[in-house]
Amino acid sequence: MAQNPVRGGTLTIALAAEPSGLDPTTNPSAAIKRVVHYNLLEGLLKVDRNGRVVPALAKSYSVSKDGREYAFVLHSGIKFHDGSPCTAEDVKFTFERLRDPKTAAPYRMFYEAIEAVQVVDSASLKFRTKKVDSNFLFNLARGDAVIVSKHSVDRLKSAPVGTGPFKFVEWKRGDSVTMVKNPDYYRKGIPYLDRVTFRFISDPSAQLAALRAGDVDVIAYDLAPENAPALGKDSRFKVLIGNTTTDVIMAMNHSRKPFNDRRIRQAITLAVDRKAVIQGAVAGYGTPIGSHMDPTNPNYVDLSGLYPYDPEKAKKLLAEAGYPTGFGAVLKLPEPYAYARRSGEIIADQLSRVGIKLIIEVIPMGQWVDRVFKNAEYDLTIIGHAEPFDIEIYARPKYYFRYSNPKFQELLKKAEAEMNEQARKKLYGQAQRMLADDFVNVYLFVYPALPAMKKEVMNWWKDYPTIVVDATEVYLQK
């Protein structure tokens, strides 16, 4: 951080996707977390810009020798934005609510290992887990583990009340979310900004025009890659080039024929030229992947060269599986994401060369969540999985891929229970290899972080090891 951050000022941030609500605890959408996490709502812990799990609302914590008890001490003087104190009782309420099936929290499984939450006093508490869980602290730093008050929990969807450095002001649907500095923030001296507005501009050209015209100060993390070189040469602006946790995949529905046949899935994988997809969809900035893990994760194994582009072998596999002339399928793409639409067009062309004819359907994000994510009503889809360290989704047979492999489920359980770092890394490596060898999905690339901004915007994140657009320590150099 610079020596003397400047106080005051207003920042307008462009985001491509508008969230459908503002409650990250009951909706898995990454678009929600990018607006609210760290800005309005906070957890006990957080993942910092370097990918480390560090204290947030918790001042300190300790872990018992048997790895099953976690004691937390909260900062003193934490208040919710409505003025009520945030105490250990609120933490207990938060996790009881997440674990209650009636809440329908999409990531409840991360907190099911909790056996009990014991309030010691208003500022300290203990978690007891049913088993050793090597990811427990990481899970407490996730965007859905934010601490909420039982008195204002009903307002989360449209006007969230949190503990963060900014307070919610208004949400103009179809346009923007505005927040102002929280004068009672428990970390003294921050935030530096007086006001932050997130503006939703889905069209990449319109985002760039808004930045050049001064209508926005920052394109959060996803400047259209083809615009990066020219903007980087303009002395009024700067472009940062970093990594995200977003694994872009073409998912296949294992509950539908012919995608339940491994040979078909292998044929599709071999018929996709990743390099051409990366060049066409993200102007060459993405990092190719061969399984469901990104390079910001310490357990990552590079499997991108394991099954190279081989359309001739793809044709043979299709014939072997009973489709010598190919088949037709529908590729559903989420409308807000240009990378998904571009990848889809390139892949449709590539698959047509081996006889697979895709019909492309571009659908609004709400419909995508409802049809594809919740009900698995699809053949193929392209989406970026932004949730960090989410390989566990493959151990859930009801997840929208409908992939069910008891061997994988067993391997993942072993990895989660392994407290030795090297042994755990080896198990996660085996898990990545199993997904690659089973051709569960087509693993395409990690989405690049390309934040672009006016040159006076300081202390912006370059890499995104978690899903946030954090304005807490950002300031404007006069």
Image (cartoon, grey):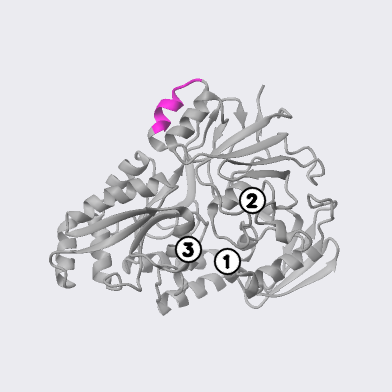
Up the image or down, 385 lies above or below 263; here it is: above
In terms of sequence position, does the residue under pointer 1 or pointer 2 come before the other? 2
Give yes or no for residue 204 being in the magenta stretch: no
| Residue 96 seen in render | yes
- Marks 1/2 in contact by CB < 8 Å: the verdict is no
Q: Estimate the spatial distance between the alpha carbons at disc 2 and disc 3, rounded to whole Å.
A: 23 Å
Tell me the SS state at disc 3.
helix
| Residue ID for mark 3 | 370
Quadrant of the drawing holding the N terminus: top right
Residue shown at the point (57%, 66%) measured from the top left: 107
Q: Quadrant of residue 5?
A: top right
Up the image or down, 141 lies above or below 426; here it is: above
Q: Nearer the viewer, mark 2 or mark 3?
A: 3
Q: Position of residue 272 (x, y in %)?
A: 26, 54
Residue shown at the point (46%, 70%) measured from the top left: 399
Using the image as rendered, state which of residue 46 and residue 342 is in the foreground: 342
* Amino acid type at image mark 1: Tyr
User: 263 left or right of 199?
Assistant: left
In terms of sequence position, does the residue under pointer 2 or pointer 3 come before the other? 2
Specify the segment rendered in magenta. 227-235
Q: Estimate the spatial distance between the alpha carbons at disc 1 and disc 2, rounded to whole Å.
A: 16 Å
In terms of sequence position, does the residue under pointer 3 or pointer 1 come before the other? 1
User: 454 left or right of 5?
Assistant: left
User: 74 left or right of 295?
Assistant: right
Q: How many other residues sit within 10 Å of disc 1, few (<14), some (14-19) or many (≥20)?
A: some
Tell me the SS state at disc 2.
loop
Q: Furthest residue to the front? A: 173
Residue shown at the point (81%, 65%) measured from the top left: 89
| Residue ID for mark 2 | 37
Disc assigned to residue 107? 1
* Amino acid type at image mark 3: Asp
